[in-house]
Amino acid sequence: MAKTVSIISLGCPRNLVDSEKLVDEFTKKGYSFREDALRADTVIVNTCAFIEDAKKESIDNILRVIDAKKEGRVRKIIVAGCLSERYGNELADDLKEVDEFRGVLNFSRNKTPDPILKMTPRHYAYVKISEGCAHRCAYCVIPYLKGNYKSRAFGPIIKEAAQLVDKGVKELILIGQDTSLYGIDLYGKKRLGSLLKELAKISKDIWIRLLYMHPANLDEEVIGIIRDNKNICRYIDLPLEHISDRILTQMRRRISKRKSISLVEHIRKEIPLVGIRTSLIVGFPGETEKEFEELISFIKEMKFERLGVFKYSREEGTPAYSYKKQISEKEKQRRFDHIMSAQQDVSRKINEKFKGEVLEVLIEEKIEESYLGRTEYDAPEIDGQVYVKGKKLKMGSFYNIRITDAYEYDLTGKYESGK
């Protein structure tokens, strides 16, 4: 009887790419992949340890698999990824039922992966272009887990992307801890612009999406290339984290309030109808009520199309762990709720502007008598969706959809025509 393997992949899309590689390792040894994670011979839990909530989620899932092993549904447990990298020895002492602990995967600069099982739907795929981080933000553990910034070589990325498009992938999503810095270590200069130009030549009938661009590193060339290529999504993922100059300095973000605002305004001037997504951190040590109100005002003024918020997580080993004036969890939650409420109003007004407009939508799922899809302004599992009325629409295909109604984060529409 063939042995089976399954995986529980936690955390960000970068982790998902690693999960695909882990499964590939086992399938090459003769294992068959099983989607039911708690009924396979070998279960891998690929963990995240970015913030406290992620660590708790990782532990909860490990305990679920241990229970399944005790019940005889699982034979072997492997715990991999960031949690193992960070706490491997402690976990081995406490979780005797786990058979193997692995850290983060080694990163290959030059290898083009063989066609492997993708854990995303068939119509989109993540392509990792770099690993590690060149920054040392005061709150972040990623550099200590993943090491220094490492870019993949140019050729293997292009080859992998072309293979994916040949297999029917309609959306290539480029990921890395900071994609805007791509190439600096290998070529002595940033080469994200050159990479995007080559990827855009593969097919005009796809979307190319960029995630995670550090605002201090996003340059004029990249902005222009996004503007000039219709198959590159007008979606700028720009984590600003805060806007108070004092907090930005304490965070070690290497950018000021003035430069942040100038960058956002420049992007909007250069790329018509752009959608900017940012992320913010509330409750950073020492954040005063005045600085928090400055952040709220900034959100209302800048009107970001997409916005995510994190409550500051105090992570041992980071400089901010020992900062004075740590803020209570209750106060962090209050500030989180306040920002989300403010952004709901902003999002609703932005979405209202789409009513009556025709947008290109990538159809992803059928639900009863309608469909679910996304616009170029929406990354999968992060942003909003479009509920579409239509008949016989194909999964993973683009359609022109006339927007009929708008909500805080989602839209509704009806089929207008094919692409």
Image (cartoon, rainbow, N blue to C red):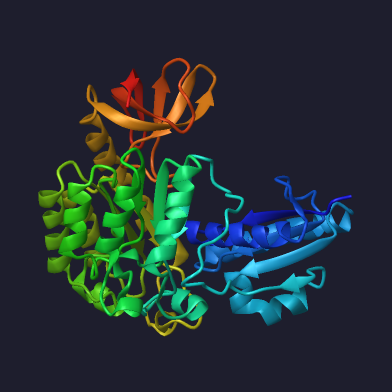
Instruction: Please give the name of the residue rendered at 79% of the width and 60% of the height, measured from the top-left corner.
Output: 66
Q: Does residue 287 appear in the picture of this structure?
A: yes
Residue 352 drawn above or below residue 100:
above
Please state if 137 lies on the left or on the right of 215 as rendered: right
108 left or right of 398? right
> Which of these two is toward me, 263 or 391?
391
Is residue 338 something one can see in this rendering?
no
Q: Horizontal and vertical percent for residue 320?
A: 40, 80
Where is residue 154, by image quadrant? Answer: bottom left
**In the picture, residue 102 is in which quadrant?**
bottom right
Q: Who's the residue at 34% across and 38% down the image?
A: 205
**Residue plotted at (45% across, 21% down):** 393
Up-down relation of residue 276 to residue 385 (above or below): below
Percent x, y of residue 358: 25, 25
In which quadrant of the rendered view does residue 380 lie? Answer: top left
Q: Position of residue 14 (x, y in %)?
A: 49, 61
Q: Is residue 27 left or right of residue 217?
A: right
Q: Nearer the viewer, residue 187 or 323?
A: 187
Q: Position of residue 194 (x, y in %)?
A: 26, 62
**Number of numbered discs visible in the structure rendering:** 0
Q: Quadrant of the C terminus?
A: top left
Is 309 or 363 nearer to us in this picture? 363
